Amino acid sequence: MDKLPTIKEIASKLNVSVSTVSRALSNHPRIGISTREKVQALAKEMGYEPNAQAIFFKQKKTYVIGVVIPSIREEFFSQAISGIETAAIEHQYTILFGQSYDDPEKEKAVVEAMKKQRVDGLIISLSKQTNKYDHLDALKKFNIPVVYFDRVPTLENVHKVYCNLYKATVEMVGWLFNKGYRKIAFINGPDKLQASKERLNGYIEGVSKQKLKIDMQLVEKTDLSKESTQAAMHKLLSLKNPPKAVITFNEYVHMDAVQYAIKQGVRVNKDIVFVSYANLPITGYTAYPPLVSIEQYPYGQGEKAMQMLIKILNKKEAGEEKEDVFYKEELYPTLVAHTV
Amino acid sequence: MDKLPTIKEIASKLNVSVSTVSRALSNHPRIGISTREKVQALAKEMGYEPNAQAIFFKQKKTYVIGVVIPSIREEFFSQAISGIETAAIEHQYTILFGQSYDDPEKEKAVVEAMKKQRVDGLIISLSKQTNKYDHLDALKKFNIPVVYFDRVPTLENVHKVYCNLYKATVEMVGWLFNKGYRKIAFINGPDKLQASKERLNGYIEGVSKQKLKIDMQLVEKTDLSKESTQAAMHKLLSLKNPPKAVITFNEYVHMDAVQYAIKQGVRVNKDIVFVSYANLPITGYTAYPPLVSIEQYPYGQGEKAMQMLIKILNKKEAGEEKEDVFYKEELYPTLVAHTV
DNA sequence: CAAATAAGTGCAAACGGTTGTTCAAATTCT
DNA sequence: AGAATTTGAACAACCGTTTGCACTTATTTG
């Protein structure tokens, strides 16, 4: 309805120029004290608020960061978002939000929408199927830096924050070994994810380290869907010699695997024990939490990713940007026994 | 580094005016076919993309909707966000995201940040402590319509989407009665929420309807924190005549109450049965899901809220806006037996 | 007391587009 | 052929704010 007050209106009411008003409002020293006060008083009275759109437009800066994740329904990512938001707010940035639903097409679409909005930067955790990065490379032309977190590409020349799960996985196998388990199965995630490779390598190293024979029959894969996880679990249970322990890719895979095992009459954590990655709050309420988990710090990863992005943006503004410098933050998680 | 191509550069390279380029790109009929093609070809070659910031600025429209919720970590809200996002994307809107963490101060801060960003509209689920609406009223001056969902204020002159839980609560009490339960306790949420009032009224009506005596000792309250819920459960268990059934405000209260009860040696769903509101995916994995829940359609509420907001925005643009028309969408949920 | 300096403002361009209006050339009509 | 019309493209204003520069007074300074 009624237009919002602008600097121009203040100017004309006071018979001064817009530049004077602009300077008066920002306490520019060249503006006389009386003018300054008059302007500020009127601005207040009229309920003037600077139009951020206009300012951002002029400054070619939006103070908006795009955040793209596979699915907000996964507690892991909702925790991550919280970390991202906290860091963003601290630095006056806001968050433009989008989900890929693990679909590369949708991922591309939201990334493009964000490009359109001219976000200052982008934080993304890849869809599990993404194997081309064109849509993200396109952001370079637009001078929009990208920080990957958790589900990062294996590329070297990108900014990223992630957990290196290799060591922790070795440790986890060792933990199981010490508890007396020898047949240790592993349900891994999609190949394309760096995380899957690390986990697999950790598993292999862990098994070797205990001088056990590596049996690839014990290594299954899931695309993270319930069905796929059930199929993997089914295969494992169908072995002549089923495993005594199962390591699962993440909490959701864990829950689905456990659920399936129970249906098959397995006495969970008795016939077969389960351990997993990620230690989420919800775990405490589930029927069969993993005996131990590997904490992946979703909140911390999100926070660090945002901080990294802000650092990059600041360098850019200061003109200190170097094309070939890529930041990498690698966290080394450890085992946590689950607190029931 | 290298600036992005603008309409101006295209114009100068082709020796035509910017207006011609602008029109050529938007297929304006007054532009000759040959010029049009030349322009579009060059635009493509240069990788031109319109600067949405500039356009939005001129059109005084951002295509950004602010979304404020208490906490993304609650699955209820992450589901709601998904619904909101789906509807938004369909209509080319994007989502600016913020959490209040159930803190009125933070809520105010994020609402103000969104006002600064000149969002086209706002969707909000109130913090459980919010009792003043100044920060939201302030948006009126900025012509930013607000749609409340789920945690809506009791005010009449606002747009809102919510579940009316009165009827479902009556039904739930009836269900328990039919199963033979007579001493039915109720752990309710914060007073200020409309939802709490509806539930309480439903409870009272439900109990009366079965010709049972209303015993206010059986009605406890929680601020939704774990401690508060435990305290409420503690009180109920300390009664000379503890309840045989407990209705809890939501899933989280349910889980905390159950956890506490177990610690006190209660055999859940044997000594005492538990029923709850909200039927979330995670429930299927929990140790003691409620026997029945009242589905609150978080996804649907989010989606409807977004659709409502878009309708309002469209009316506004068409100039059909009426100051005193307020939309209200009331959903009437029903009981669902929990699928384990 | 003229000249240099400082203080206080205004002018105008710029950010990247859109759009109403104007203007010239080409075409059609009478 | 001259008038009327259509076609194609340029001009210019505008959105709200910032900012370099110029300009006018007043105040110092030599």
Image (cartoon, coloured by chain):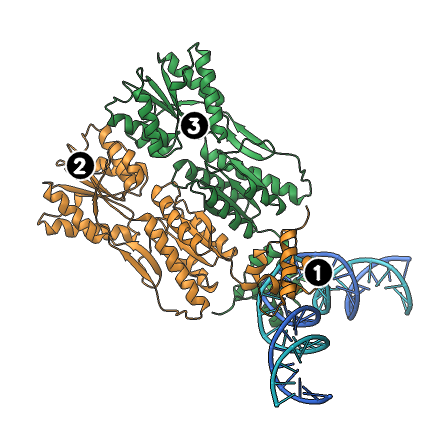
Chain colours: A green, B orange, C cyan, D blue
For badge 1, the amino acid type reads: Leu
- In the image, residue B314 above or below residue A322: below
Give me the residue at 66% from left, 53% from top: B5
Q: Name the residue under label 1.
A: B14
Circles 1 and 3 in contact, beta carbons < 8 Å: no
For badge 2, the amino acid type reads: Val
Q: Mark 3 points at which residue?
A: A295
- Whichever of callouts 1 and 2 sits on the residue coming sooner in the sequence is 1
- In the image, residue A152 above or below residue A234: below
Q: Is mark 2 on a helix, strand or loop?
A: strand
CA gap, disc 2 to disc 3? 34 Å
Nearest the viewer among B266 and A126 is A126
For badge 3, the amino acid type reads: Glu
Q: In which quarter of the view is residue A55 placed?
A: bottom right
CA gap, disc 1 to disc 3? 58 Å
Q: Is mark 3 on a helix, strand or loop?
A: loop
Residue A162 horizontal/vertical position (percent): 51, 31
Q: Is mark 1 on a helix, strand or loop?
A: helix
Q: Name the residue under label 2.
A: B273
